[in-house]
Image (spheres, rainbow, N blue to C red):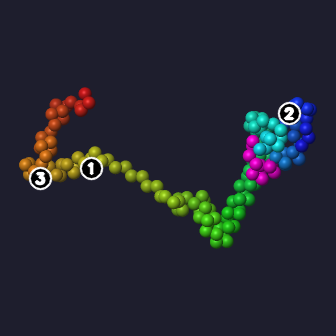
Amino acid sequence: MEKGKPGRKRKLAQLTEDEYKQISQWSGDGLNESQIATLLNVNISTITREKKRNEQFADAIKRGKYKAVQLVANKVFQNAMDGKETSAIFFLKNRDPDNWADRQEVNYNLDLKNVLTDARARIIEHAPAHALPKRARTPRASESEGEGVNE
């Protein structure tokens, strides 16, 4: 990459096709945007701003990242097909998590208030009055008067 005037950073809007290819290559080789900024002799904020402003620049970085992900995904798939268990497990957990997750999530809604009230009613129905605790024989004063506990 050519350097601009001394003391001035070069503008990314003036990149050539070869430079866009180089940026895509760097991104595909696993370099992050901060590292690419260093290689281009610009600040990371310039990279962020340029991606918003310049679609060709954003696409160069995206193409490189996609290429790298594609290569790794293909390698994981090939390893899985070659019988390497770790790759197979990784592939299945990520591609079919509903069937291959370590944990299966089950959601239940329990209304414990009704369960406890029903159980208490069954106990009171079938037990002789002298066998029940005092509080189960008569309603509490606050319940019979309609007062709340915290009032």
Q: Which residue is mark 1?
A: 115
Q: Which residue is mark 2?
A: 9
Q: Helix or strand or loop: what does disc 2 sit on?
A: loop
**3 vs 2, front mark:** 2
Report, in whole angstroms, how far the alpha carbon at label 1 lies from the one at label 3.
Answer: 18 Å
**Residue 129 position in % (x across, y down):** 8, 48
Q: Give 48 or 30, whichever is nearer the viewer.
A: 30
**Residue 124 position in % (x across, y down):** 14, 49
Residue type, mark 1 in image: Val
Residue drawn at 75 percent across, 54 percent down: 67
Magenta span includes 31: yes
Residue drawn at 13 percent across, 46 percent down: 133
Q: Is residue 128 visible?
A: yes
Q: Which residue is mark 3?
A: 127
Report, in whole angstroms, how far the alpha carbon at label 3 lies from the one at label 2.
Answer: 89 Å
Dot 1, how many residues are within 10 Å of its Cα: few (below 14), some (14-19), or many (20+)?
A: few
Report, in whole angstroms, how far the alpha carbon at label 2 lies from the one at label 1.
Answer: 72 Å
- The numbered mark, 3 or 2, whose residue comes first in the sequence reads 2
Q: Helix or strand or loop: what does disc 3 sit on?
A: loop
Q: Which residues are magenta?
A: 24-34
**1 vs 3, front mark:** 3
- Against 33, residue 141 (above or below) is above
